[in-house]
Image: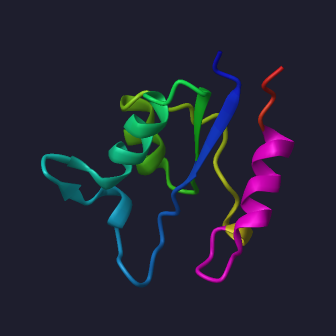
Amino acid sequence: MAVAISLIPARGGSKGAPGKNLAFLAGKPLIAYSIEDSLNCSLVGRTIVSTDDPEIAEVARSYGAEVPFLRPSEISRDETPDFPVFWHALENYHYW
């Protein structure tokens, strides 16, 4: 019974490796691997990508993930810890 929600954070503006989520590796964007693993996990009922980038959102949807909102820029910086990203997802994703 799939009960878990998988949240994949994928920021668009990386300084260390610009464009890394959309960079191709073995024929598909890097983010596709995380999405596919999540979708193939029997415990995961929903796969959600949290991103600030419309292009990442489009690619994530094309690989089967849900992108019900875009993350605001104030929690999409290099120094942003994970907790505000998770909290934003909980506040903005109505899964019931």
Q: Determine the residue positioned at 67% across, 54% down.
A: 71
Colour logic: rainbow
Does the magenta portion include 10?
A: no
Quarter-wise, where is residue 4 in the image? top right
Q: Quadrant of the N terminus?
A: top right
The image shows residue 76, relative to residue 58, as above or below, that is below
User: Is 39 positioned to the left or the right of 3 in the image?
Assistant: left
State the residue at coordinates (67%, 34%): 5
Quadrant in the picture for the C terminus:
top right
Name the dominant secondary structure of the magenta segment.
helix
Q: Find residue 58 and report its horizontal and vertical position in percent.
A: 42, 39
Residue 95 locus on image (x, y percent): 78, 25
Q: Which residue, as the protein is rendered here, is positioned at the far top?
A: 1
Could you tell me which residue is drawn at 64 percent across and 20 percent down?
2
Residue depicted at 77% across the width and 35% down the height: 93
**Number of numbered discs:** 0
Instruction: Give the percent coordinates (x, y) of residue 7.
Output: 62, 45
Judge whether 32 appears above or below 66 on screen: below
Q: Residue 26: horizontal and vertical position, in percent?
A: 13, 51
In-front residue for pair 67/5:
5
Q: Is residue 18 left or right of residue 39?
A: left
Q: Is residue 88 magenta?
A: yes
- Left or right, 86 with respect to 36, comes to right
Stretch in magenta: 76-92
Outermost residue, left direction? Answer: 26
Q: Is residue 87 above or below residue 15?
A: above
